[in-house]
Image: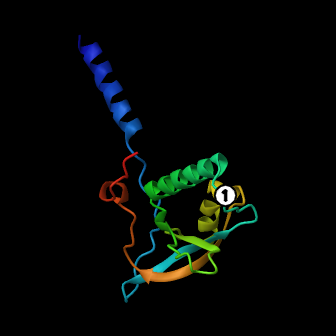
Amino acid sequence: MRRWQAMVAILALASALAGAQAPAKRSVRERDERGMRTYFMGFLTRGPSWTPEQTDATRKLQEEHLANIRRLAEDGRLLIAGPFAYEASDADQSLRGIFIFDTETREEAEELAKTDPAVKAGRLTIRIIPWYGPYGLTYADHDTIVKKPAR
């Protein structure tokens, strides 16, 4: 009987450890004396494959783009992401959105940006620039705070 109980305990522990989330891979860079630090901001612009049409393919690509954003945010290395809210009268709408990455290097942020399906497909391009901003930016609890629209 004890052998069976030990086996159940080991399986329960293994299951708990397997289900535990890996720690976020955020930068370990600390704030400076002003309470600021460097992040890496990505500016998303229309890519060579961008089109204004909404098709099944572009909707699927957008869903994949948003899933990638959620994955990077959950990972802890994407702190802020979102599109620009243009008005119809805005003549130049080529700048589509921003990402703010919490990585050690620009190269790491660029590699993460390359995982975006819309960037891979050429619908969007991204330029990464170091940005000096307030310490403590976060995308944490975004899904629990924002109410999802009913479908």
Left or right, 11 with respect to 60, comes to left
Residue 130 horizontal/vertical position (percent): 57, 79
Tell me where residue 107 sits by quadrant.
bottom right
Q: Is residue 59 visible?
A: yes
As drawn, the residue found furthest toward the front would be 89
Q: Is residue 105 visible?
A: no
Determine which residue is flagged by label 1: 53
Q: Nearer the viewer, residue 138 or 57?
A: 57
Element assignment for label 1: loop
Q: Nearer the viewer, residue 81 or 16?
A: 81
Q: Residue at x 32, y 19 (%)?
A: 7
Between residue 24 and residue 101, name the one nearer to us: 101
**Residue found 62% across the figure and 51% down from its top:** 61
What x and y, as percent, mark residue 103?
Answer: 52, 68
Which amino acid does the dot numbered 1 rest on? Glu
Percent from the top left, x then y, of residue 143? 36, 55
Residue 124, how many percent across, how many down?
66, 64
User: On screen, 103 above or below 67?
Assistant: below
Q: Residue at x 39, y 78 (%)?
A: 135
Residue 80 relative to residue 45: left or right: left
Quadrant occupied by the C terminus: top left
The answer to which of 65 and 37 lies nearer the viewer is 65
Q: Is residue 6 above or below residue 68?
A: above
Identify the image quadrant of residue 128. bottom right
Looking at this view, name the residue that lies furthest to the top: 1
